[in-house]
Amino acid sequence: MEYKNKTLFLEGDVTKFTTTDLLSEFSRIKISEIEFIDLQNVKSIDSAGVAFIDELKFKLKDFSPQFINVSEDINASIETFSAEKMPEPEPAGKANIFVMLGASLYNWLDNFRDAMYLSVDIAYWSFIGIFDRKGQRKGSVIQQSILIGVDALGIIGLLSLVLGLILALQSAAQLRQFGANIFVADLIAISMVREMGPMMTAIIVAGRSGSAIASEIATMKVTEEIDALKMMAINPIRYVVVPKFHAITICMPLLVTMATIIGIVGGLIVGITYLDLSVVSFYTQVINVLTLKDVLIGLSKSVFFAWVIVIIGSFYGFKVTGGAEGVGKATTLSVVASIFAVIILDALFSLVFLI
Amino acid sequence: MREPIIKVENLVAKYDDKVILDGVNVEFFPQEVTVILGGSGCGKTTLIKNILRLFEPAEGSVTIFGKETTKMDEDEFNKILEKIGMLFQNGALLNSVSIFDNVSIPLEQHTNLPVEIIEKIIEVKLNLVNLGHAIRLFPSELSGGMKKRAALARAIALDPPLLFCDEPSAGLDPLTSASLDELILKLKKQLKMTIIIVTHELASIHRIADRIIFLDKGRVLFQGTLQEAKVSGITEVTTFFEVGKFE
């Protein structure tokens, strides 16, 4: 690049490989007045080079220089890649805090209404589905039960055992000081049956199956499989959601029962090894402290948690927009919302049954 | 005068506030292949999705088999849908089940046929689309062309009198595309089907179209035969056929 006699001479390749150097070279040149930009010796130019030319025009706009000795090829490239002829982008509307708040409130209400409609739809078709299997694929409830229940046995069992061990260990150290070793059985039994068993299981199922439900439905939506079902006069809720709803309603209480028993076994291990309790005394204490009400509360919670997980997973699945990114977002949102809903629901249960 | 099998009147379709179809009036006649044409984003797919209520139209009426469908309840409209097949652009096969199971869905859901008869129908339909060898494969194991043919087998499982195809030739090589067109003509002739196709493949249009409907910016620019279209004098339409692509 050279500047003399009110003319800027460009030469060689003006491409993505030279543009950065040309820009810094240009910034070093002191231009007092300029009439022409000579492109005679420019060998080649690409889109980055044309962007550089646009930038030159902008920086020298006070002088309005003319381009001279522009070959046909170079001119064609400039015509193709110049940003000057692009339509002006529409100015972005100014963000107003009240408009934004209103829009998000409206959006939230919209989503809430949709979620309620979906819940009613799922409840209705799940009830109908008990008596009339039409609209469902044969064996789909068993297949879903395996996915939601059987495949989760290992992880839920292991975590429940660890949870029982931790709870017992934490309390054992305190109880031992007062010679109240046997009460570790009370603590483990009540906390596992009423709280930790159902909640921990629900959180794991929300992470495992809730995400799977959301991503499966979302993928079906973006690949038009849901539309294809509608076109075959098949209700997507009956075909896709109802088998999952039935499966999770059967599996959750069973998983919670297993998790609770394994958690109590975890407490028993600590009781035997650390607190010198016998199996019989631990067992007797557990049976004595638990009431039928505790067991029923734990199991009924598990069913409500299960329904919440399916409804939230389905809601985010059906709500998806966009492609793979949308599916990922729907899955993440569904897991977060499911876990949040499970914890809130658990708190509500605790309040209701304390009174 | 022929009675149309589908009559669309003053159809307005919107995505949020954006008008996609603006007062569309079109008719589709029995046992004809009607091709819906137009540039990208002109509302071709939206038109068929509105006819089939995959999107609810904002305004207007759609009459299928002599019945107004836009206000119909779900059960009543499902009865209409049982007489319609749809081939989606990407096939939209259920990925979690085999090709056999995909084709079996409409037969199991809407007929009381015994299993052995259903199996025979599935085999026949898959052989008709040259996929007899792929009966136990899953969609993920098929090529793009095979997926479309499998989806076509599913769409015609119940021998519907009305078949919709959304860009059946898109992404297919010329030979596969031509064989799919042949199959569509065969279906029209042997099953006396009315077929509505969204496409902008010129070769395909020349092979199969009895009538064309040309959309531009959400409005109908032309409807009539291919010959009439070529001499219509409407710049956008004639340019489409002359240049071979729509810009």
Image (cartoon, coloured by chain):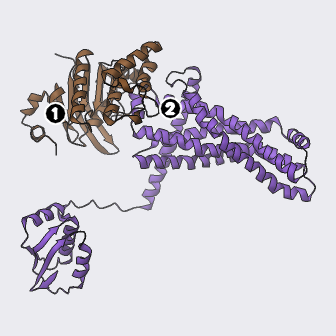
The chain holding disc 1 is: B
Seen from the viewer's position, the closer of residues B107 and A241 is: B107
Dot 2 amino acid type: Val
User: The chain coloured purple carries which letter?
Assistant: A
Residue bearing the label numbered 2: A240
Residue bearing the label numbered 1: B203
Question: Residue placed farthest to the front in the image?
Answer: B133
User: The chain coloured brown carries which letter?
Assistant: B
**Is residue A15 placed above or below A355 in the rendered structure?**
below
Dot 1 amino acid type: Ala
Question: Residue placed farthest to the right in the image?
Answer: A179
One can see residue A110 in this view: yes
Q: Is residue B96 left or right of residue A243?
A: left
Residue A65 screen position, x and y as percent? 11, 77
Callout in the foreground (1, 2): 1
Helix, strand or loop under label 1? helix
One can see residue A355 in this view: no
**Is residue A297 placed above or below B114 in the rendered structure?**
below
All told, the count of numbered labels is: 2
Q: Quadrant of the N terminus of chain B?
A: top left
Q: What's the residue at 49%, 39% (across, down)?
A: A216
Q: What's the residue at 59%, 46% (across, down)?
A: A207
Residue A97 screen position, x and y as percent? 44, 61
Q: Is residue A262 left or right of residue A79?
A: right
Q: Is residue B50 left or right of residue A355?
A: left
Seen from the viewer's position, the closer of residues B89 and A105 is: B89
Residue A111 screen position, x and y as percent? 49, 44
